[in-house]
Image (cartoon, coloured by chain):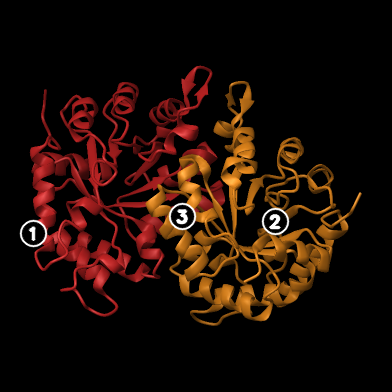
Chain colours: A red, B orange
Amino acid sequence: MIAFIDKLRAQWARTGSLVCVGLDPECDRLPAVLSTPGAAIAAFCRAIIDATHDRVCAYKPQFAHFAAVGAEEQLATVIDYLRETYPHIPVILDAKRGDVGSTAAFYAREAFERYGADAVTVNPYLGGDSIAPFTAYADRGTILLCRTSNPGGADLQERLIEGEPLYRVIARAAAGTWNANGNVGLVVGATVPSVIADVRGLVGDMPLLVPGVGVQGGDLAATVALGRDRHGAGLIVNASRSILYASSGPDFALAARGVVETMIAQGARVEPS
Amino acid sequence: MIAFIDKLRAQWARTGSLVCVGLDPECDRLPAVLSTPGAAIAAFCRAIIDATHDRVCAYKPQFAHFAAVGAEEQLATVIDYLRETYPHIPVILDAKRGDVGSTAAFYAREAFERYGADAVTVNPYLGGDSIAPFTAYADRGTILLCRTSNPGGADLQERLIEGEPLYRVIARAAAGTWNANGNVGLVVGATVPSVIADVRGLVGDMPLLVPGVGVQGGDLAATVALGRDRHGAGLIVNASRSILYASSGPDFALAARGVVETMIAQGARVEPS
């Protein structure tokens, strides 16, 4: 298996796109044209994928949207489809796992062995030994929450520890002691562009997964201007609902592609400086 | 549905036990006598439950142990069995969820509607608006990570914010602004008894879920001495592996009950002062 980071870099190079499509299927928002009983979620995701695969750097299925309706099999189907049809595109399972070491090993097994994801999002609140079972999979990515895109992200993540915001403590550990295998990334929300610049200054060329540019109202232009790495890449700019539900008509997949194209035109692209 | 906190208080009163059995099934540690193909996990959990139900205050199925092997249906079967057979015993789904508000609503739906759990564990790193979708279910419990039982729990949770450890910041918010519906609890590990005393001093009679007394080596006597509330209860003292795998022979369920009895004898019981 090609390592997550190599897959990601190759896909940035291949497409020039920094856009990641978040697969957050909501049963009551699926296009009426997809009335496949029992498998509409997977069919919807496949249609979105087929319409966007050559213009994205990654896909990010979001666990809760499947789990809330007992659709783990459809989640597995979607990831299997990606691995078989577009094996060069990295798949980030957005599950925000986090538990004591012995249990974290089961979560890592879930993400990397059961679902076969290339990377998984992990909550760092439980510290180093809760992260190690994920990073131990050297060819997979572990993307730690750093500064999240929601308003409540400030509640703890911007509190000062010895004069430094908590998110910086996370960023430095992620670039240092927690990154022995060189396979760590960070989540930094597009709703706080100044934080993206701050984190980029701490972590070198580490991949940053940046949610919040769509419905959440993050600033795409500022995000990419402040967040690109030395090679003009380094960002996984995610949008979910703004892409998935761009149209509820039979043209939903084409409309989704249109939003991706617009994001690229607005700056979500590789631009060596 | 009876509110989580009322169920818990009634079960403390009924059994006098502070013991919670963590349901962490590991396929390769199940007793040989349980060779039910495909359903051994659920059969194992049912046998443990039947052998211990009158001596515990709660059960805590741990999500990853089911998810790693694709056994969500067996997780649902176990929780359904508890609700039908022992409807008075609270079920805490230990899933440590945490995400931005719109996604947290899907996780709350998973825990409370899909699985029908009485309470769920939640990671507070994303702040107040990530917690609100859980606490909005007024009759269910939201148990926030505060100071976890693992060594890495100190990495962030004991860092000082304005002179105060992060876990205290969580405890105060959990007892204050985050607790508008009076249905919040906290996780504090038995491996740090002084922290249990500290947190109890901040949160009044709030229920504390205390993992770490079994294999992790926490101090049961100190935990209960320092952690009980004004009514001599207030603690959900969890052990998982030390109970589940007390014997690998056909006597495994009886051996599990024996460990629960020993925990009660060692102090995991309601004792009004």
Alpha-carbon neighbours of circle 1 within 10 Å: few (<14), some, or many (≥20)? some
Alpha-carbon neighbours of circle 3 within 10 Å: few (<14), some, or many (≥20)? many
Chain bearing tag 3 is A
In this view, A262 is above or below B264: above
Q: Do discs 1 and 2 share a chain?
A: no
At numbered mark 1, what does the secondary structure look like: helix, strand or loop? helix
Chain bearing tag 2 is B
> Which numbered disc covers residue A107?
3
User: Residue type at mark 3?
Assistant: Tyr
Left or right: residue A114 versus residue A244 is right
User: Residue type at mark 1?
Assistant: Leu
**Residue drawn at (18%, 65%) of the image:** A46
> Which numbered disc covers residue A113?
none
Check if mark 1's residue and mark 2's residue have beta carbons within 8 Å. Answer: no
Quarter-of-image position of residue B81: bottom right
Q: State how many labels appear.
A: 3
Alpha-carbon neighbours of circle 2 within 10 Å: few (<14), some, or many (≥20)? many
**Residue drawn at (45%, 43%) of the image:** A123
Give the camera-side residue of B119 and A178. B119
In this view, B84 is above or below A257: below
Asked whether residue A210 is in view, the answer is yes
Residue B132 placed where, x, y %?
50, 50
Query: Which mark is nearer the camera, 1 or 2?
Result: 1
Query: Which mark is nearer the camera, 1 or 3?
Result: 1
At numbered mark 2, what does the secondary structure look like: helix, strand or loop? strand
Check if mark 3's residue and mark 2's residue have beta carbons within 8 Å. Answer: no
